[in-house]
Image (cartoon, rainbow, N blue to C red):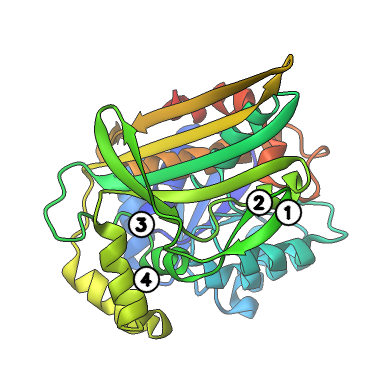
Amino acid sequence: MPTVLILGAGKIGSLIATFLAETSEYAVHLGDIEPHAPTQVSHQLVGQGIKEAVLDATDPKELEKYIQANHPDVVISSLPYYCNPTVAEVARRCDIHYFDLTEDIEVTNRIQEISVGGQRAFVPQCGLAPGFISIVANELMTHFDSLDTVKMRVGALPINPSNVLKYSLTWSTDGLINEYGNVCYGIEGGVKIPLLPLEGHETIEVDGLLYEAFNTSGGLGTLADTYTGKVQTMNYKTLRYPGHCEKIQFLMNDLKLNKQREILKHILENAIPKTLQDVVLIYVAVIGRKGGELLEENYVKKIYPQTISGKIWSAIQVTTAASLCSVVDLVFANPIQHQGFITQETFSLQSILSNRFGKYFV
C-alpha cells in the first residue's frame, strides 16, 4: 500500500485526502500548518485511518525530517504555488514521487529543473486547468492529420451570481490573482508567443447562456512547448459571466493592484463570498484537416457539485481533486514508465475517464 503525504488541508487537499483514503489502497498522511485543518478531515472520515500532521511545509528541514521519519512514497502539494519548489526539492532529495496543482509557469519550469536525473515521477499541473483540460485537448488533436486552431476554455462560476463581479471565490485567491496578472503564452503562426493577461476578449455561448473569455496565465500548461511548430494557433482563456473582465482590468490595471497583490487579495477575500454552489465549464475546440477535409471537433462539459462521503463538495473541488487522483493512480499502476518530469499530455483521456476518480468527468 503506497503511503501518501498530502500537504495542505484546504479546499482541494481535503478532498484529495478523502478520495485516496476511501479507496483503502493508500495510507494517507495529511499535513497542514494549522492544527485543526487535518483534524476536521479525519473526523469526517472516521475509520479511514488518515494520519494528521502539523507541519510547516515551507521549512525544508521540518518537511524532510517528517518524510525521513514516516517514509511516504509520494508527496502531493495542494499548497499555494510559491511553496511548491521547496516541496519538490525535498522530494528530490528524499527520492519520492511529487505531484502538485500549480498553474504558475515559472514554478513549473523550476519543477522540471529539479526533476532532472530523478528516478521518481515529478508531475506538476495536475488540476483542472492546467491538467484535465490539457489531456482533453491533446486527445482531440490526435484525431487530425494536421492542426490549424486549438481553443481551450475553462470557467468555475457561481450558479447564482449575486455581486457586481458575478463571481465567487471557489479556490486559491493567490492562484486566481496569479492567473489574472501574469504573462500568458500561446501559439500563433506555429510559434510560441507571450500574450497579455485579461486581453483577447471574446464571447461564447454554451447551452444558451452567454459567457466571456479572456487570456489568463498558466492554463495552457506545457502544451505550447509540446505543439510548437505543429499547430498554427493555440490559446487558453478563462470563462466568466459578461462584465467580469472589465471590472478586473479596473482593479488590476487602472488601480495598479497587480503590483500590490496582498492588498488585492485582502479586498477580494473580504468582499467576494465563497460558495459550494458552482458550475465548472470545460470547452475545447480543435480545427484541422482529416482526409483532406477541414473539420472541427469539440468537447463541452458542465460539472456541478457532488455529495461525497456525506458532504457536498463544489464542482471546482471535485474536478481538481479527481484529476490529480486519477494521475496518481496511473503513475502508481506503472511507476517504471513514469520517471522524471511528466507532462499532463502524457496521460490519455481514455485512461483518465476509465479511472475510478475520472468518473466525475463522465
In the structure shown, which secondary structural element does the residue marked by tag 2 occupy?
Answer: strand
Q: In which quarter of the image is the N terminus?
A: top right
3D distance between C-alphas at marks 4 and 1: 45 Å
Task: Look at the image and tell me whether residue 286 can be seen.
Answer: yes
3D distance between C-alphas at marks 1 and 2: 5 Å
The residue where tag 3 is placed is 171
The residue at 70%/68% (across/down) is: 110
Please identify, in this view, whether the residue under mark 3 or under mark 1 is nearer the observer: 1
Q: Quadrant of the C terminus?
A: top left
> Which amino acid does the dot numbered 1 rest on?
Val
Please identify, in this view, whether the residue under mark 4 or under mark 1 is nearer the observer: 1
Q: Where is residue 217 in the image (x, y as percent from the top left)?
A: 52, 61
> Which amino acid does the dot numbered 2 rest on?
Glu
| Nearest to N terminus: mark 3 or mark 4 | 4
The residue where tag 4 is placed is 34
> Which amino acid does the dot numbered 4 rest on?
Glu
